[in-house]
Image: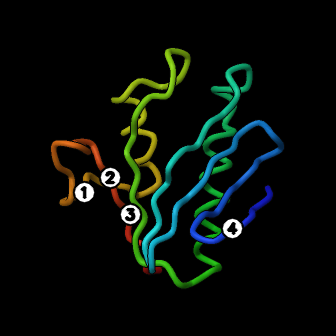
Amino acid sequence: MKFLRKKDRIFFNNNDISTGNLSIKNDTLTLEIIKTIPSCRNSNYATSTLTNVLKYIKNQNKYKTMYLNPLPIDSNGLNLEKLISFYKKFGFRKSSKSDLSHPFLMEKSLLF
């Protein structure tokens, strides 16, 4: 798993199979995208990738909250209900900051 920080972004890459990035604003992160190539979906790559991203963040010890907006990226991926369920397994919950523009916004406290 590789991580690259550039200014206000952290890019991650799990063997060119599952990739994505986080945006950084002060002590808050937003998971902008996590994408696994279609031929490797349902093979635990996204689970492994998100697990490693959360470990990396924990080791940084400077972020308080992570947000994400669980929207399906294509018809071959998880639907909205399954995406929400996937992220709940990692401790994300519906955010009190959800609104009309982000009705499914989820958040996770990173204070370990």
Residue 15 disc label: none
Task: Tell whether 61 sits left or right of 111.
Answer: right
Mark 4–mark 2 Cα distance, whole angstroms, equals 24 Å
Task: Identify the residue position indicated by label 3 in the image.
Answer: 108
Direction right: furthest residue? 15
Give me the residue at 66% from left, 37% from top: 44
Q: Position of residue 8 (x, y in %)?
A: 57, 69
Q: In this view, does 9 lie above or below 19?
A: below
Q: Which of marks 3 and 4 is in front?
A: 4
Q: Which of marks 4 and 2 is nearer the N terminus?
A: 4
Tag 4, which secondary structure?
strand
Direction top: furthest residue? 75
Residue 106 disc label: 2
Q: Quadrant of residue 42?
A: top right
Task: Tell whether 14 sits left or right of 10.
Answer: right
What's the amino acid at mark 3? Lys
Task: Identify the residue position indicated by label 4 in the image.
Answer: 6
Q: How is the image coloured?
A: rainbow
Give me the residue at 25% from left, 57% from top: 95
Q: Position of residue 13 (x, y in %)?
A: 75, 50
Q: Earlier in the sequence, mark 1 or mark 2?
A: 1
- 69, 85: nearer the viewer: 69
Mark 3–mark 4 Cα distance, whole angstroms, equals 23 Å
